[in-house]
């Protein structure tokens, strides 16, 4: 029996322990056993691979603990809801500018 509590995704509350149902493309969280290589764009390569592994091992009689994946759409919605792309971009610009002051490996510094 699965006992995962509700997880907040942006302003949506999703309980991954609900019954499987048709029309799961809009869910922000999906069970790994529900995904496979055809879902790489939806859940990422690692999660899709884990889904494939769970299917293959399950058929071989190996018990694998259940897990879930946050979809790429849910991740993007979270970033957008909290204005994170702009904040991350600003941090990357500062980091890039700071890194430009250091000499490239193998080259002598000016100072």
Image (tube, helix red, strand yellow):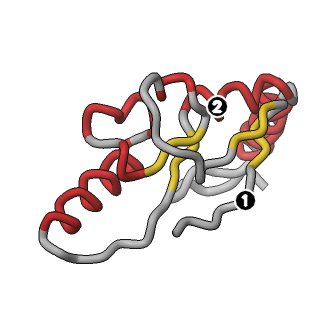
**Residue closer to the observer: 45 or 100:** 45
Judging by the rendered image, the residue that carries numbered circle 1 is 5
Q: CA distance from mark 1 to mark 2?
A: 18 Å
Direction from residue 54 to residue 66 in the image, left or right: right
Judging by the rendered image, the residue that carries numbered circle 2 is 74
Residue 54 at x, y percent in the picture: 29, 61
SS for callout 2: helix
**Residue closer to the observer: 79 or 7:** 7
* Residues packed near mark 2 inside 10 Å, few (<14), some (14 to 19) or many (20 plus): some
Upstream in the sequence, badge 1 or badge 2?
1
SS for callout 1: loop
Residue 93 visible: no
Residue at image coords 47%, 49%: 31
Cβ atoms at labels 1 and 2 below 8 Å apart: no
Residue 20, which numbered label?
Answer: none
Residue at image coords 76%, 44%: 101
* Residues packed near mark 1 inside 10 Å, few (<14), some (14 to 19) or many (20 plus): few
Residue 70 visible: yes
Direction from residue 92 to residue 108 in the image, left or right: left
């Amino acid at each position: 029996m699965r006992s995962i509590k509700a997880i907040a995704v942006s302003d949506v509350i999703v309980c991954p322990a609900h019954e499987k149902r048709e029309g799961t493309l809009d869910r922000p969280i999906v069970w790994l056993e529900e995904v496979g290589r055809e879902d790489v764009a939806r859940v990422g390569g690692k999660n899709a691979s884990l889904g494939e592994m769970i299917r293959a091992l399950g058929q071989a009689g190996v018990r694998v603990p259940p897990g879930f994946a946050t979809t790429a759409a849910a991740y993007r919605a979270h970033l957008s809801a909290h204005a994170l792309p702009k904040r991350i971009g600003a941090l990357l610009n500062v980091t890039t500018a700071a890194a430009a002051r250091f000499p490239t490996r193998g080259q002598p510094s000016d100072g």
